[in-house]
Image: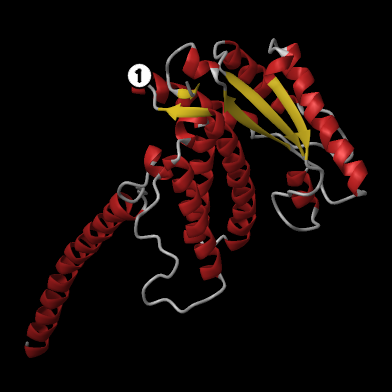
Amino acid sequence: MVGAHKEQALTSETNTRNDRIPSIKLSTLHLICLLLFASTLFGCTSYPPESRGGLAEQHIDNSFTPVMPDEPLGPEHGLRFDWQLTKLHLDSLIREGARWCFPAAVVQALEKQNRIARELEGGLLLDAANDLVIQRKRLGELERQLDYVTSQANCVPPLNENTFRQQLAVIDQLFDLLNIDNQFAFNSTEVNPKYMGHLARAANILREEPSLNLSVTGHADANGGEQYNKKLAMDRAKQVKRYLIIFGLEPNRIATQSLGDTLPLYEGVSEGTRLTNRRVSIEVIATQELGEQNRQGGYHAYD
């Protein structure tokens, strides 16, 4: 009798425990579901940092300085000082009127300066070093052009700021269009089909923008002699000009030059690096007619 009572008690306790198991499993299941939902909401959704997404990608954070707090000095600080010097150089040229005389060049220089800042922030030191070399040469050329123009004329701001900004947007579009997919095969001057499409689109835009001209610079990789590479790079620039003319752009709106292998985008001997260096680079140039005919700013001769 006592044994029967014990058996009944054990059976009752077992049943009670079994009744609790589903509720425990259910609670665990709820917890897992909540964790998955939270990870989907917060962990798997990526938003750009505040004020750095979309168009604000071009923004340079004012906290970016040559020497960061609580950071040991290293090789990257030399690049940061170089970045600061090129920024000061560009700011000086803008104050002297480069924005009104050469708006296209200033827009492109600002984009390059922002790109270098992002490379330094991301630890891409080799990319930043190469871009700094290019930026210094661009700013030096811009300074020489500005010195010549300001000795003969006066740079003035536009009367219609909105129209001016619209033209800068067109310049930005053209610059991106003409400097993507712009590589060449080894020892070749043939334009690749994808870039040919870019040239056609750019020519269509430029036909509607008579105040904008192009400067096409050919480049080669480090294979071959200096004179051979200079001629090869020039032939590449001329081939690009030829297609732009075929697509309807006037020849006198396209200047060509060659830098041979003297200005590589990247240093190295890999095939990928050499392919990147076999290219054309194209600058968009706002001409004097923009200021004199449309009164959108530019440079005007002294009386």
Q: How is the image coloured?
A: secondary structure
- Identified at 37% across, 42% down, the residue is 56
Residue 11, position in %: x, y?
A: 15, 76
> Horizontal placement of 62 versus 302: left or right?
left
> Horizontal placement of 295 versus 148: left or right?
left
> Height in image: 122 above or below 273?
below
Residue that badge 1 annotates: 160
Residue 154, position in %: x, y?
A: 47, 28
Residue 212, position in %: x, y?
A: 58, 20
Residue 240, position in %: x, y?
A: 76, 25
> Height in image: 163 above or below 41?
above
Does any portion of residue 191 appear in the rendered image?
no
Does any portion of residue 115 appear in the rendered image?
yes
Q: Please tell me which residue lies in front, 168 or 87.
A: 87
> Horizontal placement of 275 versus 293: left or right?
right
The kind of secondary structure element at disc 1 is loop
Please tell me in which quadrant of the rendered image residue 159 appears.
top left
- Identified at 49% across, 15% down, the residue is 292
Furthest residue in direction bottom, as rendered: 2
Q: Amino acid at mark 1?
A: Asn
- Identified at 60% across, 28% down, the residue is 284
> Height in image: 161 above or below 273?
above
